[in-house]
Amino acid sequence: MKVSVWDTYVKRDDGKLMHFDILVPNSLQDEQTILNYGTSYLKSKAFKTESISSKICNFCHIEQATDAVIKDIQRKGFSIIEMENCN
């Protein structure tokens, strides 16, 4: 499965900058749906963050999905790769 990778940065209330990728099937083009996936992910965190927007969430590239990413997408429509300050 090919996935689109959306590079995302969101400021936390403690001032740290979160960096994570939102991975979706590359056939998904609706930016609002992708932003909604990011919002859903942020709601799962124990800390507060800024709202996600298209200014901080941008299409980066397309890649081949791993088995774990495919399972996430089949289960919830998207997958997240946490990069920095996500915990």
Image: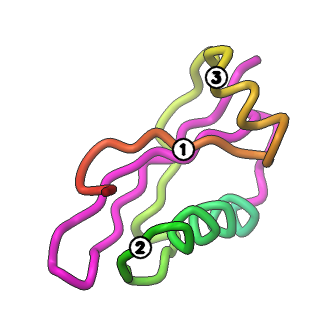
Figure check: 84 above or below 55: above
Residue 74 x/y as whole percent: 84, 34
The residue carrying pointer 2 sits among few (fewer than 14), some (14 to 19) or many (20 or more) residues within 10 Å by Cα, namely few
Which amino acid type is marked by label 3? Ala
Residue 63 x/y as whole percent: 57, 20
Q: Residue at x 68, y 15 (%)?
A: 67
**Earlier-in-chain disc, 3 versus 2:** 2
According to the picture, the residue beneath numbered tag 2 turns out to be 46
| CA–CA distance in space, label 3 to label 2 | 24 Å
Q: Are marks 3 and 2 in contact (CB under 8 Å)?
A: no
Q: Nearer the viewer, residue 68 or 19?
A: 68
Q: Is residue 35 magenta?
A: no
Q: Quadrant of residue 27?
A: top right
- Of all residues shown, which one is farthest toward the front? 46
Which amino acid type is marked by label 2? Ala
The residue carrying pointer 3 sits among few (fewer than 14), some (14 to 19) or many (20 or more) residues within 10 Å by Cα, namely few
| CA–CA distance in space, label 2 to label 1 | 16 Å
- Per the rendering, the mark at residue 24 is none
**Earlier-in-chain disc, 2 versus 1:** 2
Q: Quadrant of residue 55?
A: bottom left
| CA–CA distance in space, label 3 to label 1 | 11 Å
Which amino acid type is marked by label 1? Ile
Q: Quadrant of residue 2?
A: top right
- Per the rendering, the mark at residue 80 is 1
Quadrant showing the N terminus: top right
**Earlier-in-chain disc, 3 versus 1:** 3
Give the colour scheme of this rendering: rainbow
The stretch in magenta equals 1-30
